[in-house]
């Protein structure tokens, strides 16, 4: 179909007193004219035509910024938003994680469905509680040692081959690495607070490596190569256990 024509920002009325501004699907092509929003806390620019993050420096009160489903190629010009707690740049065309060093109050970061190839440049985000990097091109779990407050980590639909470098994330309660290239359950020894573990659609052959994960309430290992249900009898808090039905299960 024909490309959408960006709207003229002068036709959009902005309330200087507004704390929550929702401009979802307004055909906005450029971020401009938002400096009048002196009290804004939440700014939603979902499903627009934005190509560049810019002209937000004066929004000192901003806590949440939603840029989901635009055409953004680079994370930039966010340094002044020191109080930002939630940032969503999912469904864009990012290739790199960058430009986040100053956002030390960030608690939730969503970068789903981009073209990111590496986990990097997150070391300063020590308040981060949720990190969502699903549907990218990531090959390794790395560079997250400083994210010790992380509660939820989502890495589904990437190209990850090994569970590794998770030791420091002792507060993690949700870990999702569905639809990757894992062949073994490992590297989870220190994740003693883990409650939900999603490992479906990988190449795992044996249920193992869960000796220290006694708090698990949800375990999803569907669509793997597992032929025997074993090594889960100690998981006494388990409420949901997802496996694929095959010819016959061996239970031990």
Image (cartoon, grey):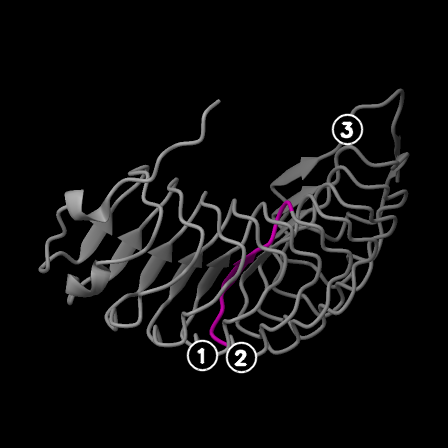
Numbered disc 3: secondary structure: loop
Q: Let me know if residue 130 is in the magenta part.
A: yes
Say which label, 2 or 3, has the lower sequence index. Answer: 2
- Tell me the quarter of the picture where residue 33 sits: bottom left
Numbered disc 2: secondary structure: loop
Where is residue 157 shown, x and y percent of the image?
A: 69, 43
- The residue carrying mark 1 is 102
Residue depicted at x 90% and y 42%: 205
Q: Let me know if residue 48 is in the magenta part.
A: no
Numbered disc 1: secondary structure: loop
Q: Nearer the viewer, mark 2 or mark 3?
A: 2
The answer to whether residue 181 is left or right of residue 241 is right
- The residue carrying mark 3 is 244
Where is residue 10 shown, x and y percent of the image?
A: 17, 48
Which segment did they paint magenta?
126-135
- Tell me the quarter of the picture where residue 70 sits: top left
Where is residue 122 shown, x and y percent of the image?
A: 58, 72
Say which label, 2 or 1, has the lower sequence index. Answer: 1
């Amino acid at each position: 179909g024909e490309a959408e024509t960006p709207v003229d920002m002068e036709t959009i009325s902005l309330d200087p007193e507004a704390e929550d501004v929702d401009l979802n699907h307004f055909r906005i092509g450029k971020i401009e004219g938002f400096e009048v929003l002196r009290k804004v806390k939440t700014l939603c620019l979902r499903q627009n035509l934005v190509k560049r993050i810019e002209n937000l420096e004066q929004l000192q009160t901003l806590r949440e910024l939603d840029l989901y489903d635009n055409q953004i190629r680079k994370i930039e010009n966010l340094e002044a938003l020191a109080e930002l707690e939630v940032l969503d740049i999912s469904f864009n065309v990012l290739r790199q994680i960058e430009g986040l060093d100053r956002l030390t109050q960030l608690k939730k970061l969503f970068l789903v469905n981009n073209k990111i190839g590496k986990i990097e440049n997150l070391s300063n985000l020590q308040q981060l509680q949720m990190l969502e990097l699903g549907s990218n091109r990531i090959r390794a779990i790395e560079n997250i040692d400083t994210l010790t407050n992380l509660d939820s980590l989502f890495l589904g639909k990437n190209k990850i081959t090994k569970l590794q470098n998770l030791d420091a994330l002792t507060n993690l309660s949700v870990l999702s690495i569905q639809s990757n290239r894992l062949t073994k359950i490992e590297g989870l020894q220190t994740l003693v607070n883990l409650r939900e573990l999603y490992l479906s659609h990988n190449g795992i052959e044996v249920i193992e490596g869960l000796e220290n994960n006694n708090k698990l309430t949800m375990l999803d290992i569907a669509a793997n190569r597992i032929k025997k249900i074993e090594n889960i009898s100690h998981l006494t808090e388990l409420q949901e256990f997802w496996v694929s039905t095959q010819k016959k299960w061996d239970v031990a």
